[in-house]
Amino acid sequence: MQKNESTREFVKEYYTKAAKEPRSNLCCPTSYPEEDTSHIPSEVIERFYGCGSPMSIAGIRQGETVLDLGSGAGIDCFIAAKKTGPDGKIFGIDMTDEMLKVANTSKTEVARNLGYSNVEFRKGYLEEIPVDNKSVDLITSNCVINLSPDKRKVFTEMNRVLKDHGRMVVSDIVSVHDIPERLSGNEELLGECIAGALTETQFLSYLEQTGFYGIEILSKTYWKSVENMDFYSISVRGYKFEKTAGCVFIGQHAVYNGPYKYIIDEEGHVFPRNQAVEVCTDTAQKLQAAPYTGAFTIIEPGENTGSEYSCTPNDTSNGNGSCC
Ligand SMILES: C[S@@+](CC[C@H](N)C(=O)[O-])C[C@H]1O[C@@H](n2cnc3c(N)ncnc32)[C@H](O)[C@@H]1O
């Protein structure tokens, strides 16, 4: 059996047991507020093996399509189901039959409590997500990517299924230093989300390399130390932006409004505060969307970019309803 295949088989076996018999100490303690979980059966809550609360910090909007990777017994999917309302759609992906069984059995009670049914669990791998290209607004995952034997593939797949301007909010365990061989080969530590952890730097650079931008660490808490190595739970957000036109300059400029003296985006563009910088059409579009909304003013071709440019986007005091 190939190494990747045997890792998956071990993880499957590990979480089959954890689905059959709940384990209270499997991952770091985290919880959701009662109002988010009151519609969820206790069989699911007892099998919550996450290390963060992505559904509390993802800014879920009514009607969104949400994809939860490694959905386990389904807790995050059921929370999202309430937050998106009946017009939303939630997909939970997991490879372990016993976990899917708990999730699917609980779906009926959740639907009864909410008054609608909008969750679908699909069996599959994070490395080959069984969801269409560009079909999802938000991807979440709670303490799963560390278990994957091919993490780069997972990030690439996430980018494939996200819609343009879609976002990922992922909680996972990371280490400070590379995991030494004596730990990486320890199967119990793999199951506990320790031995397969990326370093925080690797985690962020995988995101960058697979095309995410606007990357932000939303939370970081110490989890534990194993053989003098520290492990943290982090929650990270990143966005997808699809370049359509390529590098086409039509005379647009971007002005960074502050509060920092200058910033650099993932592509290396430097934007000093209050200076008009030439940008291509794709970059101009990107800077007007989340997470940059309000941070930049885009000056269209023919508009003034020089010293006369002095107002802020909210300044419409010239009476014609526009800035400058
Ligand atoms: C630590 S549990 C987390 C479950 C859930 N996110 C939660 O917070 O309760 C990891 C889950 O990810 C699933 N899993 C691990 N690796 C996977 C992979 N490569 N593809 C699909 N599912 C995977 C396991 O079957 C298990 O249900």
Image (cartoon, rainbow, N blue to C red):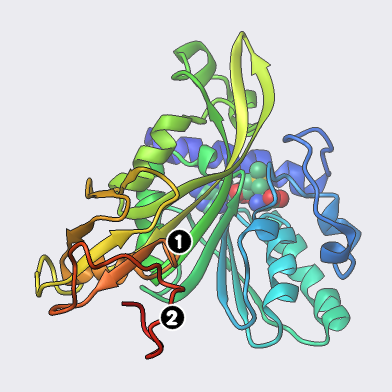
Question: Badge 1 local density, few (<14 within 10 Å), some, or many (20+)?
Answer: some
Q: Which mark is residue 291?
A: 1
Disc 2 designates what residue?
Answer: 317
Where residue 102 appears, as percent x and y from the top left, is: 77, 61
Disc 2 from disc 1: Cα separation: 27 Å
**Horizontal placement of 103 versus 160: left or right?**
right
Q: Quadrant of residue 115?
A: bottom right
Q: Indicate if the residue with disc 2 has its beta carbon within 8 Å of ligand 1.
A: no
**Horizontal placement of 102 versus 174: left or right?**
right
Kind of residue sitting beneath label 1: Pro
- Mark yes or no: residue 6 visible: yes
Q: Quadrant of residue 10?
A: top right
Q: Which quarter of the rendering shows the N terminus?
A: top left
Give me the residue at 11% from left, 65% from top.
247
Q: Indicate if the residue with disc 1 has its beta carbon within 8 Å of ligand 1.
A: no
Give me the residue at 62% from left, 65% from top.
59
Kind of residue sitting beneath label 2: Ser
In primary-sequence order, the first of circles 2 and 1 is 1
Camera-side residue of 280 and 68 = 280
Where residue 246 appears, as percent x and y from the top left, is: 13, 68
Give the SS element for disc 1: loop
Q: Which quarter of the rendering shows the C terminus?
A: bottom left
Give me the residue at 26% from left, 67% from top.
309
Where residue 303 appears, as percent x and y from the top left, is: 18, 78
Question: Badge 2 local density, few (<14 within 10 Å), some, or many (20+)?
Answer: few
Asked if 185 appears above or below 294 in the picture, the reply is above
**Horizontal placement of 292 versus 186: left or right?**
left
